[in-house]
Image: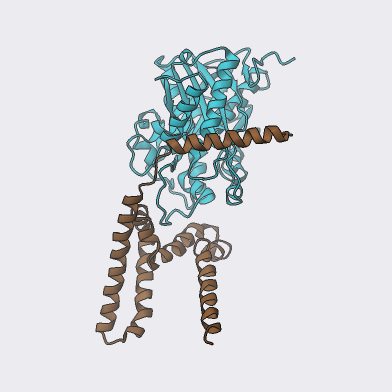
Amino acid sequence: MATRRIGRSTVRFAAPPVIVSAGTVAGPMESRGPMARWFDEVVPDDMFGERSAEKAERRFMGDAVKIALTQAAVQPEQVDYFIAGDLLNQVITASFTAEDLGMPFIGVYGACSTSAQSLTVASALVDAGFADLALAATSSHYQTAERQFRYPIELNIQRKSTSQYTATGAGAVLVGRSGGKVKITEATVGRVIDMGTKDPNQMGPAMAPAAAETIFSHLADTGRDPGFYDVIITGDLGSVGSQILLELMQRRGVPLGDNYADGGVMLFQGVRGTGVGGSGCACSALIMDGFVWKRMCEGEIRRALIVATGALLSPLSWQQGESVPCIANAVTLQV
Amino acid sequence: MASPGAKKQKADDRAKYQKLASSIVPRPQLARNIAVAFVVGGLICALGQAVMNAFIASGMTGDEATAPTLATMILIGVVLTGLSVYHHIGEFAGAGAAVPITGFANTVAAAAMDFKREGYILGMGAKMFIIAGPVLVYGILAGVTVALIKWLSRG
């Protein structure tokens, strides 16, 4: 009997694990946005002095992990699991970082929902007694993501009215049994939703129904209404996608109020050349592990629902004319 | 698996959602994009004409001046790509930057730069025409087709 399940998609942790520490590293575009002051490290050169963007992305993830470990004064040998993912084929950034760290490694892929997905796995392992300390990390990089999913960086392409900008950066969270103020109390694992959006420039509209589904299930499973939370933050719907989400929730009879915000919009508000907002694994990671966690430590936010949204497309699937399967994973953080 | 009824329901739901989404997705700024593409594309072509005139002024015939003019424009496109300038022109001007031969040069140079890290053979050599390739394939195909029609219709 699964005693921690409350409803179709949500678990409530028996002894809620805590965030012991978190580290965030952001690139140059991200540091121009309003969230900049919440990041632990800002790198003015998105190549990190490396010869390839892929190597640079590894440095971002490595530094985020290092910051989290240093803050908690924890040695890599003390961490039972490293749970990480990124956007690149075969989650290669996470694998190389894991090799460096030497921790037992669980590679995960949830596209841009990986931040909440990896935190869910880490929390479950700690809560169930499989680990005392588990480290969850995610990264993305504008250049590596463009190369893999879209076009060469220097190509003359005009941004579409719904284009988003992949965040460059990484976030890492150390989850443990004690030693932190912010608890992970519930997690809602999303179902894959595909409402037929085929245009890879419309990630927000593609993901909005998945976000709506997960928020709706979470609230139904927990018996809460949106007002329970100080903030409900989606990962990277962008301004267009979040507008659609608001409309969908309205139609389902659970309107979201002023406590709703989107991480993609928050990250790049007022930054030129970023389309309708940020995207990528790092987008929700930077917001959750930077802004939200720090505001919660200060006691400014007491209850947060993080809904990390992911478009699970592959470059092949959209070229073959398939629509975009999407997911949203949610975690509840409370102090 | 889904029954036929459930399949139909899903298709209906998708159609309904796409209608809702497209009512919220902002329209592309067609008028602005067309006007800017026209002006910037026109300026690039005017530059090409100036280069050609210069070659003609140096004593070439119009036919002789064509090849060095194209080569000069390609060089300009490649250099601006290497300096990371051309994609900004593309972002601003859309088709105005993509259609002239400078845009074609940009697609080759951009791919070459991007894939250099994977080596000169498997990377740059293999992937250089990843964007420009289709233009060549269908450009040549169209040329052959038109030539064939012309040849057949000689009577």
Residue furthest toward the left?
B57
User: Where, by quadrant of the figure, is residue A163 drawn?
Assistant: top left
As drawn, A151 above or below A226: below
Of A90 and A193, the residue lying toward us: A193
Judging from the image, the colouring scheme is by chain
Q: Colour of chain A?
A: cyan
Where in the figure is residue B102, as x and y percent of width and height? 38, 66
Where in the figure is residue B86, as x and y percent of width and height? 36, 59
As drawn, A198 above or below A221: below
As drawn, A262 above or below B103: above
- Tell me if residue A75 can be seen: no
User: Where, by quadrant of the figure, is residue A326 drawn?
Assistant: top right
Which chain is represented by brown in the image?
B
- Tell me if residue A92 can be seen: yes
Where in the figure is residue B142, as x and y percent of width and height? 52, 72
Of A167 and A276, the residue lying toward us: A276
